[in-house]
Image: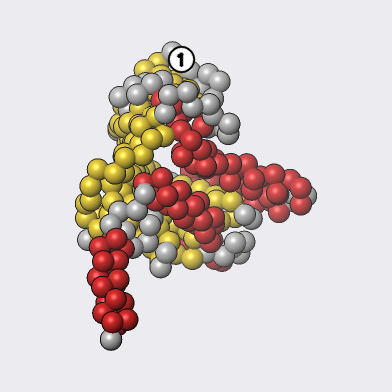
């Protein structure tokens, strides 16, 4: 009987700890790993992207093609492409398809690795930031922890694209059940260079990404908002005010046939 009461007491005292927010560093590391897993799993999914810029809205279909995504534009401002632009997109696609299918195994591996490297910098988040929990919030009906990310003084980037982490502070909303990012915000506090002379994004730019649970344990972007100022080719300032929507997620074959591609264009 005493053993029974000791067991009950242990469960009662343990229960609050199970629902308490875990160590923020541990939480971030686990959520990064799951985000990276999502990145790889997304290679099996196609979707529609709607890019709402200041001057026009572009609708694209994105799907896996021989190991990495391919984007084909299907509409402008809500209207299907005119025949000449559609034919141009079709020619671009056929050229890329032929090129990818003619690759050597080493070339294919290099292309896929180049794509994967785009998110390698996430590995350096624990080294680049101090994490601080600031509370909880419900996102799309699901409870999430909120953690702020403040750049650490003296951080030395080791991976491609990690340099920008020194100039960004952020905030993450991490779903309690799945330990997945439900929302991420980035606020630029320094100048970020893109390419050698392509563009620079100045302080004050803001990026917000909302993610959605599209399958058990799989979270993918649903919306992205970008605002701020960029200097293009170091000559012209351009206001950034853009929204991207990601919809119609569906499983897609890794190497779609012409018929399957046509069907995806009609979704």
- Tell me the residue that label 1 is attached to: 234
State left or right for residue 87 relative to residue 153.
right
Residue 195 found in image quarter: top right
Decide if residue 182 is in sight here.
no
Decide if residue 220 is in sight here.
yes
Q: Give the image location of residue 251, x and y in percent.
A: 49, 66
State left or right for residue 141 relative to residue 246.
left
Which residue in the rendered view is the most extreme toward the front? 2
Say which residue appears at 30% left-offset and 66% top-offset. Answer: 14
Choose between 123 and 230: the one closer to the eye.
Answer: 123
Residue 187 found in image quarter: top left
Within 10 angstroms of label 1, few (less than 14), some, or many (20 or more) residues?
A: few
Q: Give the image location of residue 12, x and y in percent.
A: 24, 70
Of the 4 image quadrants, the one containing the N terminus is bottom left
Say which residue appears at 51% left-offset and 38% top-offset. Answer: 124
Q: Give the image location of residue 154, x and y in percent.
A: 47, 23
Choose between 81 and 114: the one closer to the eye.
Answer: 114
Say which residue appears at 52% left-offset and 42% top-offset. Answer: 123
Of the 4 image quadrants, the one containing the C terminus is bottom left
Q: Secondary structure at mark 1?
A: loop
Which residue in the rendered view is the most extreme toward the top? 235
Judging from the image, the colouring scheme is: secondary structure
State left or right for residue 79 relative to residue 159.
left
Q: Give the image location of residue 146, x and y in percent.
A: 28, 46
Say which residue appears at 64% left-offset and 48% top-offset. Answer: 112
Q: Is residue 154 above or below residue 252?
A: above
Which residue in the rendered view is the most extreme toward the bottom? 1
Choose between 150 and 109: the one closer to the eye.
Answer: 150
Choose between 20 and 86: the one closer to the eye.
Answer: 20
């Amino acid at each position: 009987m005493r053993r029974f009461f000791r067991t009950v007491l242990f469960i009662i005292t343990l229960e609050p700890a199970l629902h308490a927010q875990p160590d923020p560093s541990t939480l971030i590391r686990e959520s990064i790993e799951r985000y990276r897993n999502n990145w790889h799993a997304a290679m099996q999914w196609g979707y529609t992207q709607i890019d709402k810029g200041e001057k026009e809205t572009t609708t694209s279909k994105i799907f896996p093609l021989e190991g990495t995504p391919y984007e084909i534009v299907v509409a402008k401002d809500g209207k299907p492409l005119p025949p000449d632009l559609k034919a141009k997109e079709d020619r671009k696609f056929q050229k890329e398809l032929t090129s990818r299918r003619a690759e050597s195994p080493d070339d294919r591996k290099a292309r896929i690795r180049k794509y994967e490297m785009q998110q390698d910098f996430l590995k350096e988040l624990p080294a680049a930031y101090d994490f601080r929990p600031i509370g909880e919030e419900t996102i799309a009906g699901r409870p999430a922890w909120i953690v702020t990310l403040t750049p650490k003084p003296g951080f030395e980037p080791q991976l491609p694209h990690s340099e920008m982490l020194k100039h960004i502070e952020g905030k993450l909303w991490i779903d309690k059940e799945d330990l997945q990012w439900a929302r991420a915000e980035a606020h630029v506090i320094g100048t970020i260079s893109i390419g050698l002379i392509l563009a620079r994004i100045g302080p004050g730019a803001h990026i917000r990404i909302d993610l959605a649970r599209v399958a058990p344990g799989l979270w993918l972007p649903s919306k992205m908002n970008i605002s701020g100022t960029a200097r293009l080719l170091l000559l012209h300032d351009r206001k950034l005010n853009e929204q991207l929507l990601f919809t119609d997620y569906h499983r897609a074959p890794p190497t779609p046939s012409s018929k399957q591609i046509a069907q995806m264009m009609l979704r």
